[in-house]
Amino acid sequence: MSAETAATPSVSFAFTASAALSDSLQRVLVDLIALGVTTKQAHWNIVGENFRDLHLNFDEVVDIAREGSDEVAERMRAINAVPDGRPATVAAGATVPSLPKDEITVSEGVAYVVSAIEAVVSTLRGVHDAVDDEDPASAGILEDLTGKLEQQAWFISSEDRKPVR
Ligand SMILES: [Fe+2]
C-alpha cells in the first residue's frame, strides 16, 4: 500500500464547535487553570489567625478549578476543538489577578481568592449565553462551575466579614 492510499483513520464528530464556541471555552479554560495555580499560592503563603481553616478551604477552590479545567478541556475535545493549556497561553489570556510572591495575611488571602473567583465567574457568566445558544451541553458544565465557585466566594468572603445590622 502506498503512502497515498494508506488511510488515515477518519474521526467523525456528531457536532463540531464553531470558532466562537471554541474561543469561549478556551477563555474559561485558561481562567480555571490560573485560578487553580494561584489559589495554591495563597494556600501555601497565608499566615495569621484562622490560617488552618482558610488553608483547607483554598484547596477546595483548587480542586474545583482543576477538575473544572479538565472537564472543559475534555468537552472541547469531544466537540472537535483543541484546548490550549500551556503556561504561556494561560499567562497571556487569564483574567485572574496576580498574587504577591511573599507571605500574605489571612485578610489579603481572602480578598485575593474572592477576587480571583469573581474574575472566573465573570468570564463564565460572560460567555454563557452564546455557549448555550450553540451547545447546551457545554453551557451545563459552565453553569455547574458557576454555582460551585459562587458558593466558594460566599464561604471565603464570610471569613472576613462582620454582620450587616
Ligand atoms: Fe497543601
Image (cartoon, rainbow, N blue to C red):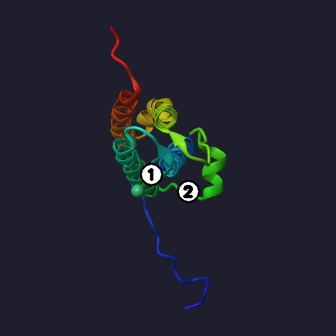
Q: Amino acid at mark 2?
A: Gly
Q: Is residue 90 above or below residue 54?
A: below
Quarter placement of the C terminus: top left
The residue that label 2 is drawn on is: 85
Q: Which mark is residue 69?
A: 1
Q: Is residue 160 above or below residue 96?
A: above
Left-right relation of 101 to 134: right
Q: Report the residue at 45% width, 40% height from top.
A: 48
Question: Element under label 2?
Answer: loop
Q: Is residue 46 above or below residue 159?
A: below
Q: Nearer the viewer, residue 25 or 152?
A: 152
Q: Nearer the viewer, residue 62 or 67?
A: 62
List x then y, in percent, for residue 143: 36, 36
Q: Nearer the viewer, residue 119 or 41?
A: 41
- Residue farthest top in this picture: 165
User: Quadrant location of residue 154?
Assistant: top left
Q: Amino acid at mark 1?
A: Ser
User: Quadrant location of residue 164?
Assistant: top left
In space, the residues marked 1 and 2 are separated at their CA atoms by 9 Å
Q: Report the residue at 55% width, 56% height from top.
A: 85
Q: Earlier in the sequence, mark 1 or mark 2?
A: 1
Q: Is residue 49 above or below residue 70?
A: above
Neighbours of disc 1 within 10 Å: few (<14), some (14-19), many (20+): many
Neighbours of disc 2 within 10 Å: few (<14), some (14-19), many (20+): some
Q: Report the residue at 62% width, 48% height from top.
A: 101
Quick check: marks 1 and 2 in contact, CB under 8 Å?
yes
Q: Nearer the viewer, residue 156 or 83?
A: 156
Quarter placement of the N terminus: bottom right
Question: In the rendered image, is residue 67 in sight?
Answer: yes
List x then y, in percent, for residue 127: 50, 34
